[in-house]
Amino acid sequence: QADIDKSLNNAHRQILFLSEMINDLATLSKAETSKNKIEIEKFTVDEILNELDISFRPKADEKALTFSIKIEPGLPEMKTSKLYVKDILQNLISNAIKYTQKGGVEVLASKASEGMVIFAIKDTGMGITKAEQSKLFQKFWRSEDIHTRETEGTGLGLYITAKLAKELGATVKVESVKDKGSTFSVIIPAVVNSSGSGVEVIEKKADL
């Protein structure tokens, strides 16, 4: 029975990995399309972070991690790709939970400057060395750290995050201390501007 359970667990892990790979490759294909079309819609920071809270709080609870979201009052309404913003934040929050074994993850939203919103994802995880920080957003790159290698990953999440951020005119930054944690910050224009970005911005049609 033990061998059967082990085989089933391994098969389940492989299925989840393949599912993640398929999702990442589909998103990557969309992000790398030479003339991409971005559907924009209006939404609030509260709205998108509440949706992410529903998705990720149970995952944090499974690992006995704290999970908190703090939103600065008076943030501007977003008029950009909700799909892209959500993909970016999902990747960053998912990584934070994946690579944190104790402590917790905190998501902060605040005003960066006029017309800009900054989302910061802070964790108390294993951290990233200075040498590896410059490689984080490369395609298929994964850390050689033995603890990182113990987790499943396609090596595409942060590469996709950087590609999607570029199309929105956003910037992704990382601050990290080995064995103490990391903070990934993404500064996103509240209103997307297609000027010079090589993408076509179109209004999302209202659902009928």
Image (spheres, rainbow, N blue to C red):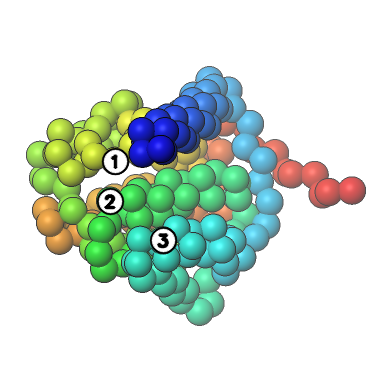
Indicate which disc, 2 or 1, sits on the residue closer to the N terminus.
Answer: 2
Residue 100 in the figure: left or right of residue 67? left
The residue that mark 2 highlights is: 99
Which residue type does callout 3 highlight? Glu
Give me the disc on residue 62. 3
Indicate which disc, 2 or 3, sits on the residue closer to the N terminus.
Answer: 3
Q: Between marks 2 and 1, how big is the CA–CA gap?
A: 8 Å
Please report contact status of discs 2 and 1: CB closer than 8 Å, yes or no. yes
Q: Position of residue 107 (x, y in %)?
A: 40, 65
Indicate which disc, 1 or 3, sits on the residue closer to the N terminus.
Answer: 3
Q: Residues within 10 Å of mark 2 (few under 14, many from 20)?
A: some
Give me the disc on residue 151. 1
Q: Between marks 1 and 3, how big is the CA–CA gap?
A: 15 Å
Q: Residues within 10 Å of mark 1 (few under 14, many from 20)?
A: few
Which residue type does callout 1 highlight? Thr
Q: Nearer the viewer, residue 90 or 196?
A: 90
Residue depth check, mark 2 versus mark 1: number of the one nearer the observer: 1
- The residue that appears at 53% across and 77% down in the rendered structure is 74
- The residue that appears at 73% across and 44% down in the rendered structure is 203
Q: Position of residue 72 (x, y in %)?
A: 46, 76
Which residue type does callout 2 highlight? Tyr
Please report contact status of discs 1 and 3: CB closer than 8 Å, yes or no. no
